[in-house]
Image: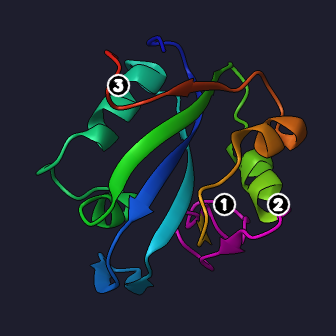
Amino acid sequence: MTADTGTYVLILRCDTAARLRIGRWGALDARPGYYAYVGSAFGPGGVRARVTRHARRGKAMHWHVDYLRDHAALVSVWYAHSDTRLEHEWAEALAGLAGMEPVNGFGCSDCRCGSHLFFSPARPALERFRRVALGTVAVWRPDEAV
């Protein structure tokens, strides 16, 4: 993973149910299982800086996913370096995968997508996502150096 721009999917594991207050968005009834959150990184430091921020605990709450991340473990990150924003296409790709349930309105207040967060009781399948996603999808895991 580099400091180049790109798109990413955070794969989060939630072990316990909880009602989470998500800033001004509202409440999320988090369930045990997996969440996939799609984002993009086109600012300074690109994908590496954004993923490093998401991996940290105890940070200022800026994005909707920060509140969920405070409760759920980061399992892996799927990403692609590109000058093209792929987050909307990737959200659509996740929505089309069997077993993925959109969390309506989450993380997409600045676009027309129905959601940028998806829930699945089972761990999302990377290979299934790679078959439908645009770009070359790589993987980073928290136990690897950024």
Q: Does 105 appear in magenta?
A: yes
62 in magenta = no
Residue at position x 86%, y 62% in the image: 96
Q: Residue at x 82, y 45 (%)?
A: 128
Dominant SS of magenta comes to loop
> The C terminus is located in which quarter?
top left
The span from disc 1 to disc 2 (Cα, nearest Å) is 21 Å
Q: Are marks 2 and 3 in contact (CB under 8 Å)?
A: no
Looking at the rendering, which quadrant does residue 115 occupy?
A: bottom right
Q: In which quarter of the view is residue 21 placed?
A: bottom left
In x, y percent, where is residue 126? 70, 40
In the picture of the structure, the residue carrying the numbered disc 1 is: 111
Nearer to me, 3 or 74: 74
Q: What amino acid does circle 3 point to?
A: Ala
Callout 2 secondary element: loop
Magenta residues, as a range? 96-117
| Mark 2 lies on residue | 97
Q: Amino acid at mark 2?
A: Leu
Query: Looking at numbered disc 1 in the image, what kind of residue is underneath it?
Result: Cys
Q: Earlier in the sequence, mark 1 or mark 2?
A: 2
